[in-house]
Image (cartoon, helix red, strand yellow):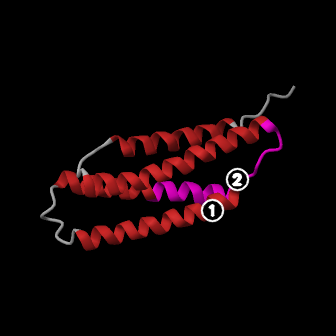
């Protein structure tokens, strides 16, 4: 599963680079764009970077736990993280090019990412030993 995170993280990082190119080519006159739309575009762009870095780090450091309950929490967390990344990329496209305003797409992406991080955190809670 760590390789899946690493490969997916690199792919999402490439998407981050591509979305940066889109912003530069599609909106060369930054002064013409309303500041609210420009901030929306940049924040969604940074969310994609944030998401890719989480996957890359998990790909480098994730160790699947031997206990079944821990492994299940890790799998659930990974599913949430993958879903969150898809939502964040979709939010960039949808909010920047379609509606040109805030929508729930980026909110869902952030919530899914938060849930994934929490599940991975819970999978690492150690039992107290006497």
Measuring 68% from the left and 44% from the top, which residue is drawn there? 75
Q: Residue tagged by mark 2?
A: 62
Name of the residue lying farthest toward the top: 130
Quadrant including the C terminus: top right
Expressed as whole percent of the image width and height from the top left, the position of residue 65 reads 79, 45
For mark 1, give the secondary structure.
helix
Give the residue drawn at x 68%, y 62%: 3
Q: Residues within 10 Å of mark 1 (few under 14, many from 20)?
A: many
| Residue 10, image x, y percentages | 56, 66
Q: Up-down: is 52 above or below 107?
A: below
Most common SS among magenta residues: helix
Q: Which residue position holds label 1? A: 6
Up the image or down, 108 lies above or below 89; here it is above
Q: Judge from the rendering whether residue 97 lies leftward or rightward of residue 115; answer left or right.
A: left
In the rendered image, residue 35, in percent from the top left (x then y), is placed at 18, 54
Which class describes the residues within 10 Å of circle 2: few (<14), some (14-19), or many (20+)?
some
Q: Is residue 58 above or below residue 71?
A: below
Secondary structure category for the residue under label 2:
loop
Magenta-tinted stretch: 49-68
């Amino acid at each position: 599963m760590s390789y899946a995170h690493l490969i997916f993280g690199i792919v999402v990082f490439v998407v981050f680079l591509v979305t940066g190119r889109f912003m530069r080519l599609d909106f060369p006159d930054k002064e013409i764009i309303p500041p609210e739309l420009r901030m929306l575009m940049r924040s969604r762009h940074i969310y994609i970077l944030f998401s890719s870095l989480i996957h890359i780090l998990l790909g480098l450091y994730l160790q699947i736990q031997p206990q079944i309950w821990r492994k299940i929490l890790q799998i659930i967390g990974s599913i949430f993280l993958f879903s969150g990344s898809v939502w964040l990329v979709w939010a960039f496209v949808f909010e920047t090019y379609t509606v040109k305003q805030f929508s729930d797409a980026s909110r869902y992406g952030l919530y899914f990412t938060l849930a994934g991080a929490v599940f991975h955190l819970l999978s690492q809670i150690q039992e107290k030993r006497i």
